[in-house]
Image (cartoon, grey):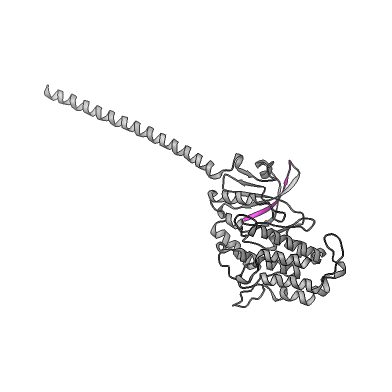
């Protein structure tokens, strides 16, 4: 009988223990489920906070308010440029029968969204007659990113200078393009609360409309790229002849390095020569070709800048003297000084250009 009571007691204790264990397991499972739901909800909130992209992952800026995700993604596009970090498309919008420039940035080349958004908001707020505006920005679910810009009919400055267009040799065209670039860069360097360093100024990043008005594009683009991609951008700039000699890493770009690149473009406009040094000396730090430096004195003044065919924008015929072109050349060379401290400030560049026209 005693043995029977012990067995009943053991069974009761065992049942009680099992019940306690089951209750604890149910409690823990419910708590974990509740915690997971909380994490999911928090993650969703964090994504919305982080992206701040609004509906359909699209940020719209001035003149881009009517754009939709479908407009951008469904637009037939033609590739007009490629780089290690992205692709440039000329896209035709079906709904509005208009043309836009779409710059696709590869997901592996860009920084995280929490770093992208404030930069995009900054770049999208910048407006100036000589800067290419950002109209919209799209971020896709797979990390793809698209920057939406207006399209300009004459393409970029490199194409204009290389396609044999006779207008590229006329002083009024050279001057109009040059002062437009300088005004755009001046706004970036001194017209905002904080200076924006272009970081990749070159003739391919100067767009032209049909009236030869110049627009500086791609300013601040390096801020959206990760260190490896931005460094590759700098290496391409060096290979093309636009990198200031003291610049080693893209993170060290400055107003002075932008001024150097501007000087190269001014010389390129004036001489029609590419800035690449085909056979640089081992210790050479100055990338400009001797042919670029000498072209103006060899034949440009006597053969190409004929005073009797040069017109002001107003249409009034004016003489263009060798002194006028020489001042332009000297200003460009000053911008390209190997010493950053000797390069003029953008305000000084703009002032000198305006003096030349007087």
Magenta span includes 284: no
- Residue extending furthest left? 2
Q: Which residues are magenta?
A: 86-95
Q: Tell me: 175 left or right of 187.
A: right
Residue 268: image location, x then y, percent: 72, 68
Q: Name the quadrant of the N terminus.
A: top left
Q: Tell me: 163 left or right of 261.
A: right
- Residue extending furthest top? 1
**Viewer-proximal residue, 303 or 311?**
311
Q: Name the quadrant of the C terminus.
A: bottom right
Residue at horizontal 69%, vertical 74%?
289
**Viewer-proximal residue, 39 or 316?**
316
All told, the count of numbered labels is 0
Res 63 → quadrant:
top right
**Viewer-proximal residue, 259 or 64?**
259
**Viewer-proximal residue, 118 or 147?**
118
Res 195 → quadrant:
bottom right
Q: Tell me: 95 left or right of 246.
A: right
Magenta span includes 87: yes
Q: Tell me: 65 left or right of 1.
A: right
Residue 265: image location, x then y, percent: 70, 66
Res 132 → quadrant:
bottom right
Residue 150: image location, x then y, percent: 71, 50
Main secondary structure found in the magenta portion: strand
Q: Is residue 37 above or below residue 333?
A: above
Residue 18: image location, x then y, percent: 27, 30
Q: Is residue 71 above or below residue 181?
A: above
Q: Is residue 339 above or below residue 206?
A: below
């Amino acid at each position: 009988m005693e043995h029977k009571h012990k067995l009943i007691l053991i069974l009761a204790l065992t049942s009680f223990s099992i019940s306690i264990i089951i209750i604890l397991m149910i409690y823990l499972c419910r708590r974990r489920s509740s915690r997971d739901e909380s994490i999911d909800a928090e993650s969703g909130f964090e994504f919305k906070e982080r992206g701040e992209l609004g509906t359909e992952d699209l940020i719209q800026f001035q003149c881009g308010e009517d754009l939709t995700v479908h407009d951008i993604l469904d637009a037939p596009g033609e590739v007009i440029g490629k780089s290690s970090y992205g692709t440039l498309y000329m896209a035709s919008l079906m709904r509005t029968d208009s043309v836009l420039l779409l710059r696709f940035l590869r997901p592996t080349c860009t920084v995280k969204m929490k770093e992208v958004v404030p930069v995009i908001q900054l770049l999208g707020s910048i407006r100036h007659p000589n800067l290419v505006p950002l109209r919209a920005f799209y971020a896709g679910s797979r990390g793809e990113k698209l920057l939406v810009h207006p399209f300009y009919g004459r393409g970029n400055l490199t194409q204009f200078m290389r396609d044999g267009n006779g207008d590229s040799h006329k002083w009024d065209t050279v001057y109009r393009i040059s002062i437009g670039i300088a005004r755009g860069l001046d706004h970036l360097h001194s017209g905002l609360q904080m200076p924006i360093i272009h970081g990749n100024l070159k003739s391919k990043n100067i767009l032209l409309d049909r009236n030869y008005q110049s627009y500086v594009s791609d300013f601040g683009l390096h801020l959206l790229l990760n260190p490896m991609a931005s460094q590759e951008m700098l290496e391409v700039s060096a290979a093309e002849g636009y990198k200031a000699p003291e610049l080693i890493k893209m993170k060290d770009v400055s107003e002075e390095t932008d001024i150097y690149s501007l000087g190269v473009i001014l010389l390129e406009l004036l001489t029609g020569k590419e800035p690449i040094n085909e056979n640089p000396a081992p210790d050479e730090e100055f990338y400009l070709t001797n042919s670029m430096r000498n072209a103006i004195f060899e034949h440009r003044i006597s053969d190409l800048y004929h005073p009797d065919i040069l017109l002001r924008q107003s249409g009034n015929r004016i003489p263009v003297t060798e002194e006028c072109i020489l001042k332009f050349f000297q200003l460009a060379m000053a911008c390209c000084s190997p010493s950053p401290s000797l390069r003029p400030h953008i305000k000084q560049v703009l002032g000198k250009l305006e003096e030349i026209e007087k």
